[in-house]
Image (cartoon, grey):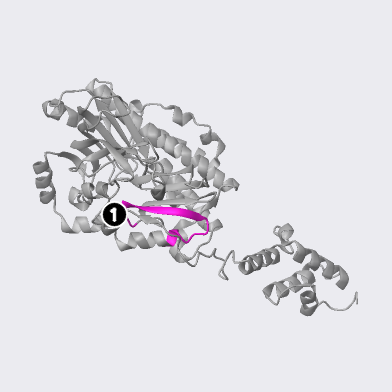
Amino acid sequence: MGKSKLKGKDLMKLGFKQSRAVGMLLNALQKHFKHNSKDEKLKMASQLLENPKNYEEDEAFGMIAKDLLQQADIEAGKITAYGEIPLRNKSLDFEVYGKEQIEKGAIQQMYTAMKLPVVCAGALMPDAHQGYGLPIGGVLATKNAVIPYGVGVDIGCRMCLTMYNLPDNFIKRYHTNLKQYLVDNTRFGMGCEFDAPERIDDEVLESKVFQEIDFVKKLKQTAYKQIGTSGGGNHFVEFGMVEILTADNDWNLPIGKYIAILSHSGSRGLGAKIANHYTKLARQNCPLPREAQHLAWLDLDTELGQEYWIAMNLAGDYASACHHQIHKRLAKAIGEKPVAMVENHHNFAWKEKLADGTDVIVHRKGATPAGKGVLGIIPGSMTAPGFIVRGKGEFDSINSASHGAGRQMSRRKAKDSLTNSDVRKYLKQQGVTLIGGGLDEAPMAYKDIHEVMRSQQDLVEVLGTFHPKIVRMAED
């Protein structure tokens, strides 16, 4: 027997199934072990079949081991015959707030997301519209997995509001000065930065993450140059008027009006590069069907998953630092100290618990945290009020609320259907001064914030409102 030729049927008697692995193994044994006896070859084949994982990096049997492991995953239903991780046959149920205001495409994206095998709960906020993978306004809870595109490209995109005890006529009286303060102390757009002498150092730039993760290490110079700046699109810095509506507020402020500064932006180039890098790796390590490719996840038990989690948190801290620098610059310019500050992320992932106590990772892509007692800001548009809110801790919404009014026109539709003269006329009627901005950010491109707020009365209580007066955005 030792001298006879090894055949496919011999391998199948060991337990190999009729597949390309049999032919690959016969070729590998002939190439690398042609002088070994048939019994020795059968013993090698048996050991490979018993534990293919031990042979993944083996020069002779590596490809065969991976083929066997893939076949086992297909049989177990972990992947499809195309090597993809299969989705659930049926979407899990999820709450939709303000459904009549939400486009069908966003709802369909949410149905797809709720078929992911790692997902255990979800909700869709009333400002929702289509995005990449998870819709903007989508909230997704997963089991020990983080989805980079479930967080979004602009990691840690957030709101920050500071209030000042100044007279009601302050903005009107110093209108020209305030416009200049915004021009002098803010920077907008892709790649924008402050000149070296103008930069303010920050402890976030000394984070050990910049030394510990090789990919992030390369981003420190970009982070240093861009700190304190804002992106393009819907990012803004505004002077406006806050009205505190209830004495039951977290700052012990009397009911009344306050001058305020509101900013909206994220983690700039640092966050964008982290998001794109780890999304690419997630898609390589977590192949999904075409309709769900942007929802590829990283397991938090893996080194790669932990690496993204650490980098994501750095980007969140950096986004917060950018806002703080904007507000410090403007406070210095007007010569006043704020009496209160409110801020919140709305593109991030958090470790939280569901109503039944299950530990989950909650992704809020364009959604405001609204756990019980949690403060946040929900802006309207450059002519519509924003709202200072306190979360009610509604578990059906996964402790979340909208992050704004949400778009009712795509950027392309806004540019095609509106004119600069229309927008300028409307802004003048509303008493709003705009520096920069494009037609895609015209107030008419956004939903009615009052309708959005009515759809989430069970999610948040309103403590105050913010009315924009002087708005600074990126040039078109």
Specify whether 266 is left or right of 3: left
Q: Position of residue 374 (x, y in %)?
A: 38, 36
Q: Is residue 195 visible?
A: no
Q: Quadrant of residue 51?
A: bottom right
Q: Residue at x 24, y 20 (%)?
A: 335
Q: Is residue 104 visible?
A: yes
The residue beneath circle 1 is: 98
The image shows residue 335, relative to residue 467, as above or below, that is above
Q: Position of residue 97 (x, y in %)?
A: 32, 53
Q: Position of residue 398 (x, y in %)?
A: 42, 47
Secondary structure beneath dot 1 equals loop
Q: Quadrant of residue 223?
A: top left
Q: Residue at x 27, y 22 (%)?
A: 332
Q: Nearer the viewer, residue 181 or 258?
A: 258
Q: Which residues are magenta?
A: 112-130
**Does residue 370 belong to the magenta stretch?**
no
The image shows residue 291, relative to residue 151, as above or below, that is below
Q: Residue at x 9, y 46 (%)?
A: 425
